[in-house]
Image (cartoon, grey):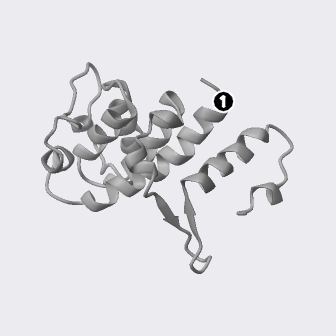
């Protein structure tokens, strides 16, 4: 898998995670993704060691969020399953799913993100009027970020 595929997976994966997690944020206690999508995708998987129930702070805080995202990635075998498991934990689902989506996208690559999610994806940009980024815009952004290794000029990272 190429660096570009991993970079695009991380950027688009984060946006997909945020979009999928937002409707469930602060909803009923856990399991909300599985309830809505009962076909088995999103069933929480077991795994040794740390789990979300060991968090001592709300999962919107940095360390519990990262811990939950890593747990979801470690205890599943695909981008889709990692995101479903992260959302099923409940709480700050858009934040946790965005971090999980970025990590899973970097591991599994852009092509592992289902097209039924990347097709309708749109990211409104606060402060930019009606500006909205779509999947192809995010892939282009990932490409620009991937090409810049050292000595990056902040102007290179402006929105197109």
Q: Is residue 140 visible?
A: yes
| Point 80% across, 57% down: residue | 154
In the picture as drawn, the residue positioned furthest to the top comes out as: 48
55 or 37, nearer to the observer: 37
Residue 139 pos. (x, y %): 62, 47
Q: Is residue 61 visible?
A: no
Q: Quadrant of residue 115?
A: top left
| Point 33% across, 54% down: residue | 21
| Point 28% across, 41% down: residue | 84
Count the numbered circles shown: 1
144 displayed left or right of 54:
right
- Per the image, label 1 sits on a secondary structure element best described as helix
Residue 86 pos. (x, y %): 30, 41
4 displayed left or right of 38:
right
Tell me if residue 120 comes above or below residue 112 in the rendering: below
Residue 30 pos. (x, y %): 17, 47
In the picture as drawn, the residue positioned furthest to the bottom comes out as: 129
How crowded pointer 1 is (Cα within 10 Å; few <14, some 14-19, many 20+) is rated as some
| Point 28% across, 21% down: residue | 49
Tell me if residue 111 comes above or below residue 19 in the rendering: above
136 displayed left or right of 85:
right
User: In the picture, which quadrant includes the N terminus?
Assistant: top right
Residue, disc 1: 3
93 or 79, nearer to the observer: 79
Residue 124 pos. (x, y %): 52, 69
User: In the picture, which quadrant includes the C terminus?
Assistant: bottom right
């Amino acid at each position: 898998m190429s660096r570009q595929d991993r970079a695009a997976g991380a950027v688009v994966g984060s946006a997909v995670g945020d979009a999928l997690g937002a409707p469930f944020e602060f909803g009923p206690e856990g399991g909300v993704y599985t309830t809505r999508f009962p076909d088995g995708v999103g069933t929480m998987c077991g795994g040794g060691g740390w789990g979300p129930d060991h968090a001592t702070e709300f999962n919107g805080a940095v360390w519990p969020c990262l811990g939950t995202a890593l747990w979801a990635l470690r205890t599943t075998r695909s981008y889709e399953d990692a995101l479903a498991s992260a959302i099923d934990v409940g709480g700050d689902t858009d934040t946790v799913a965005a971090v999980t989506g970025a990590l899973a996208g970097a591991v599994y690559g852009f092509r592992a993100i289902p097209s039924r999610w990347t097709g309708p994806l749109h990211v409104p940009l606060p402060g930019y009027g009606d500006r909205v980024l779509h999947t192809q815009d995010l892939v282009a952004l990932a490409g620009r970020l991937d090409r810049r290794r050292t000595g990056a000029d902040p102007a290179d990272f402006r929105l197109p």
